[in-house]
Image (cartoon, grey):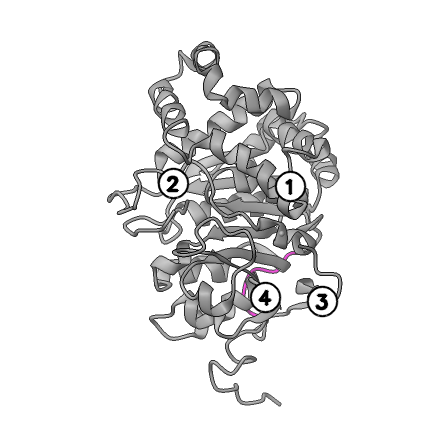
Amino acid sequence: MSLLSGQSPLSFLLVPFFILNLSQCQSADPAQGQSVGSVVQTVSDLEDEFGKGVKDRARFDEAFAVRSVDVIKQKAKLFADHYPSSNERRIDLFRPHVERIGGAYVGVGTDQNFTFIAWARSPVAYLMDFDSVIVYVNRLHFLFLKESPDYAAFKKMWDRASRKETAELIRQRLGNAPDYAKYVEAYDVALRGYSGVPDRLKELEWMSSHFNFRSFHNDDADYQYIRQMAVDGRIQAVLGDMNGETTFREVSASAKRLNVPIRLVYLSNAEEYFRYPQPFRVTIQELFTDEKGMIIRTVTAGAKEFGYPEGEKFVETHPFHYNLQNIKKMAVWMKDAPHPLWVYDMLKKRTDVQKGFSVLHQDPYECGFLPAKPSVP
């Protein structure tokens, strides 16, 4: 559910009257982040550079590659060994703010990424996790997408009743791969218990019936979009620790080589479990992004104080609050806010949009968290 190592993480209603234009949230410090000139924002832009279906395969692969990853030295102390699916039910709240935003996508976790990628129409995507099993669950998702012409076929591959047939498909496609055992392990984990991938796919239908949630499971255009990404090899899953000094920065370097600014970074609720160590702060400050880039996050810490939406799965114990933040504003927090800093303290400065959903659209100076900088003549 997160890509944070050595920690213990747990684990949409439209807004017609108040949708903040986050692309206008400029950094108070123009030196923050990397500037982006003429950029690749859409699939059409990418095809102009590499050809339809990424025809110039070798050149694209060289640019898209994440050339090195973090070494995960300590297994995270989780409430469960693995989190193969999301338990965030109200991601529909993000849709008005991320739809058609384009640019590169970076995210933790599994299925929820497909929703955000399809809405954003991201031309490339990087899925990171500190848990190697989840990395391989995502790679199985990619395989099943390529093998399934529609969502019904994709869902059937994850059906527990189809386990024998799906296992045979995995063997046929990947049996000779040196990491075949990793795929077998990931498939087994993804079907376990009551929070596996099949259970989440059923829950997507519940979310649709209760909150008019539309995503790759009931919108063929969204499904075909993410399927084409898998077919074209424009989405990858890599091992990484967001507090590390390698994977996240290599993802940024890859996006820079492609000249695709990172527009969405989905962190789930991982920020609750650390206090923004220096490596993370440096990564955010140096991220290859632009003024439209946004952080997508959820939090359980403070959710009952901040507010949570209807339909949460664990209302009594761990409901989620859903929040957006401009990445360049976040970079100012990471540069100037003192150590230690907790996401809970930042979210006290949020602007509520509706019940359970907010935007943190000010840097620490603008919101009064830090004294105002002296004016410069």
Report the side of 351 relative to 52 (left or right). Answer: left
Which residue position holds label 4? 359
Q: Nearer the viewer, mark 3 or mark 4?
A: 3
Kindly identify which residue carries mark 1.
209
**Pointer 3: what residue?**
18
- Residues at marks 3 and 2, CA–CA distance in whole angstroms: 40 Å
Sooner in the amino-acid sequence: mark 2 or mark 4: 2
For the residues labelled 4 and 1, the Cα–Cα distance comes to 26 Å
Q: Tag 1 or tag 4, which sits nearer the N-term? A: 1
Residue type highlighted by circle 3: Phe
Compared across the picture, whether 146 is left or right of 70 comes to: right
Q: Amino acid at mark 1?
A: Ser
Mark 2 or mark 1: name the one nearer the start of the chain: 2
Start and end of the magenta stretch? 30-36
Residue in the picture at 59% in, 88% down: 376
Is there a contact, CB below 8 Å, between mark 3 and mark 2?
no
Gap in angstroms between the C-alphas marked 2 and 4: 31 Å
Q: 319 and 82: which one is in front? A: 319
Which residue sits at x=71%, y=31%? 220
Q: Callout 4: helix, strand or loop?
A: strand
Labels 3 and 2: the sequence-earlier one: 3
For residue 109, above or below residue 342: above
**Visible residue check, residue 161:** yes
Q: Position of residue 66 (x, y in %)?
A: 47, 38
User: Quick one: quadrant of the C terminus?
Assistant: bottom right
Query: Which amino acid is tagged 2?
Result: Val
Disc 2: which residue: 69
Q: Nearer the viewer, mark 2 or mark 4?
A: 4
* Cα distance between the residues tagged 3 and 4: 11 Å
Q: Does the stretch in magenta take in 31?
A: yes
